[in-house]
């Protein structure tokens, strides 16, 4: 009996204690969620350790055993798979300096040294295997993995289609897409009192429409399902990437195949529509005249392949358009949302942008040339591209023995070496950027005198992004339209904003932004 009483008392006391522990844990969790000092820049830049010097002293003749980086899932070590390639490299660079020569990847070094980037400008080859995962949507033989010589031929062929003149031709339509989006937000605020938007989703919507207009010059079909299309892109890019890292279930694999089919169907509809327009214009069926300057799809449909001298084959047109669209749509879309996110973090920056816009535009919609006068906005975008570069890692493949500079001793590398450039980590280097972890739009985000190649969100040298001008116009235009109409605030806890450092730096949980209307603009 006594035994039972004691046990019962013990039991009651224990239960009480248990309840207290659970409640305390709950309170602690709520306290953490509410008051934990949030980090900015977002969680992708987590370490407070600074790179102080490169320990690499005269690294000579790094041996090579095989020709290419092996990105076959079986050859990627578990320690890399576990945390992801870029976080892995960041950790190693923080510990071992700006040049890593002992990576567990075959014949591969990783460099974040601006001097090395400077001396890599003329290297025009990329490691094919690293981008193999994109073959299902870009084709086996795509521009991204063309050799330096072939890339040069095609890049100069494509160049006119990405020129300022073509961008100006398309500008009006691109602006209409942006205006339509901000108009819809305004309507939602007035009619439904909904003032929070998922900015990444919306940035992607704008960049998809604008990039299709810029590259294809045709309208999307009437029944086009934008949501399904964006979802398919998401599934394909993330799915293919995960497949390369061997973390994909069969179920998802099947979904990816269906999504790829969906993307190709849309591409084919757009390409056929262009062919139809060109054919009927040439035959004089309609009254339209062909625009004086050709966009990318015009070039592919109407000019000869510079390599073969023959018409482009349909399959090749599809692959090239798919590659350009993927490169353009995702990067620009996330750049818009990362920029808006950065703006929410500094009220003064926001006011300064709005003052600049109000002063230059006087309440009118921005013309192409107005964007050129928005210098502070330009600086904010560049700073945001430094903190959150949409393509966080670049690479080159050495076809022949090559000497590369570093801030310390030179590197003598043998043919067959793969050089990785995790530019996110270059952009974070404390030695080059005084307060590299801080978003600071008041300073030029790259100190040209100290280190000329420490800011390269668009890459560098022979393989630099061919569409930087187009990308900057799209980002500036959309951010300008947003800032003209709204004040923006982050509508989620800061510590929930985090970047997924895969092929493209996307916000894992999207970026929720609260919109507070400003005065309207005169149409
Ligand atoms: C914010 C937007 C963008 C960023 C940050 C960006 C960044 C980059 C980077 C880092 C590279 C690789 C450069 C290198 O290896 O050195 C690249 C390549 C490329 N980008 Fe962009 N890009 C953007 C927008 C666009 C747009 C709008 C298009 C097309 C409409 C585009 C088309 C391409 C193509 C085709 C390549 C491959 C070029 C080659 O292999 O030679 N990009 N981009």
Image (cartoon, rainbow, N blue to C red):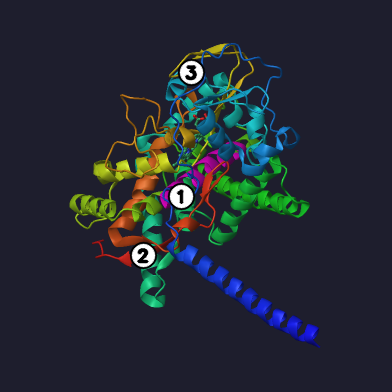
Q: Residues within 10 Å of mark 2 (few under 14, many from 20)?
A: many
Label 2 sits on residue: 515
Label 1 sits on residue: 42
Residue in the image at 47% along x and 46% along y: 211
Disc on the earlier residue, 2 or 1: 1
Which part of the image, by quadrant, shows the N terminus?
bottom right
Which label belongs to residue 157? none
In front: 37, or 436? Answer: 37
Q: Position of residue 142 (x, y in %)?
A: 61, 32
Mark 2 in CB contact with mark 3 (< 8 angstroms):
no
Marks 2, 1: nearer the viewer: 1
Numbered disc 3: secondary structure: loop
Which part of the image, by quadrant, shows the C terminus?
bottom left
> How much space separates mark 2 and mark 3, taking CA atoms?
45 Å
Q: How many marks?
A: 3
Which label belongs to residue 122? 3
Q: Position of residue 112 (x, y in %)?
A: 48, 28
Q: Is residue 320 magenta?
A: yes
Residue in the image at 57% along x and 74% along y: 23
Q: Residues within 10 Å of mark 1 (few under 14, many from 20)?
A: many
> How much space separates mark 3 and mark 1, taking CA atoms?
34 Å
Q: Is residue 328 magenta?
A: yes
Q: On the rendered structure, is 298 left or right of 241? A: left
In the figure, residue 295 lies in which quadrant? Answer: top left
Q: Position of residue 412 (x, y in %)?
A: 55, 12
Farthest front residue in view: 2
In front: 138, or 305? Answer: 138
The span shown in magenta is: 318-338
């Amino acid at each position: 009996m006594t035994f039972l009483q004691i046990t019962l008392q013990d039991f009651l006391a224990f239960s009480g204690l248990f309840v207290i522990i659970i409640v305390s844990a709950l309170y602690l969790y709520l306290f953490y969620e509410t008051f934990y000092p949030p980090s900015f820049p977002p969680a992708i830049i987590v370490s407070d350790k600074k790179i102080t010097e490169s320990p690499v002293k005269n690294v000579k003749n790094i041996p090579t055993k095989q020709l290419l980086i092996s990105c076959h899932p079986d050859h990627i070590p578990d320690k890399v798979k576990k945390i992801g390639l870029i976080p892995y490299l960041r950790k190693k660079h923080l510990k071992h300096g700006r040049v890593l020569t002992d990576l567990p990847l075959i014949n591969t070094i990783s460099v974040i040294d601006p001097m090395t980037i400077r001396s890599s400008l003329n290297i025009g080859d990329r490691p094919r295997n690293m981008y193999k995962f994109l073959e299902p949507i870009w084709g086996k033989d795509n521009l991204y993995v063309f050799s330096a010589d072939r890339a040069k031929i095609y890049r100069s062929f494509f160049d006119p289609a990405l020129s300022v003149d073509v961008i100006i031709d398309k500008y009006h339509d691109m602006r209409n897409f942006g205006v339509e989006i901000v108009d819809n937000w305004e309507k939602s605020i007035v009619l439904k009192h909904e003032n929070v938007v998922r900015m990444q989703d919306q940035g992607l919507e704008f960049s998809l429409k604008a990039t299709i207009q810029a590259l294809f010059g045709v309208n999307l079909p009437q029944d086009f399902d934008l949501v399904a299309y964006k979802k398919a892109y998401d599934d394909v890019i993330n799915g293919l990437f995960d497949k390369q890292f061997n973390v994909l279930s069969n179920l998802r694999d099947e979904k990816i195949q269906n999504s790829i089919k969906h993307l190709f169907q849309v591409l084919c509809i757009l390409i056929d529509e262009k062919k139809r327009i060109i054919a009927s214009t040439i035959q004089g069926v309609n009254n339209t005249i062909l625009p004086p300057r050709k966009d990318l799809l015009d070039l592919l449909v109407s000019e000869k392949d510079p390599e073969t001298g023959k018409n482009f084959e349909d399959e090749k047109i599809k692959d090239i358009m798919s590659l350009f669209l993927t490169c353009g749509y995702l990067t620009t879309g996330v750049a818009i949302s990362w920029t808006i996110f950065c703006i929410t973090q500094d009220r003064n920056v926001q006011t300064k942008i709005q003052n600049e816009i109000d002063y230059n535009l006087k309440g009118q919609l921005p013309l192409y040339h107005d964007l050129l006068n928005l210098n502070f906005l330009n600086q904010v975008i560049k700073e945001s591209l430094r903190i959150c570069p949409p393509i966080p890692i670049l690479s080159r493949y050495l076809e022949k023995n090559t000497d590369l500079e570093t801030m310390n001793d030179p590197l003598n590398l043998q043919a067959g070496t793969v050089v990785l450039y995790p530019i996110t980590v270059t952009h974070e280097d404390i030695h080059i950027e005084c307060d590299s972890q801080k978003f600071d739009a008041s300073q030029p985000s790259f100190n040209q005198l100290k280190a000329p190649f420490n800011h390269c969100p668009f890459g560098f040298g022979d393989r630099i992004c061919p569409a930087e001008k187009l990308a900057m116009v799209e980002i500036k235009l959309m951010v300008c339209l947003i800032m003209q109409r709204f004040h923006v605030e982050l509508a989620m806890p800061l510590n929930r904003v985090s970047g997924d450092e895969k092929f493209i730096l996307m916000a894992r949980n999207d970026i929720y932004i609260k919109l507070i209307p400003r005065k309207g603009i005169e149409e």
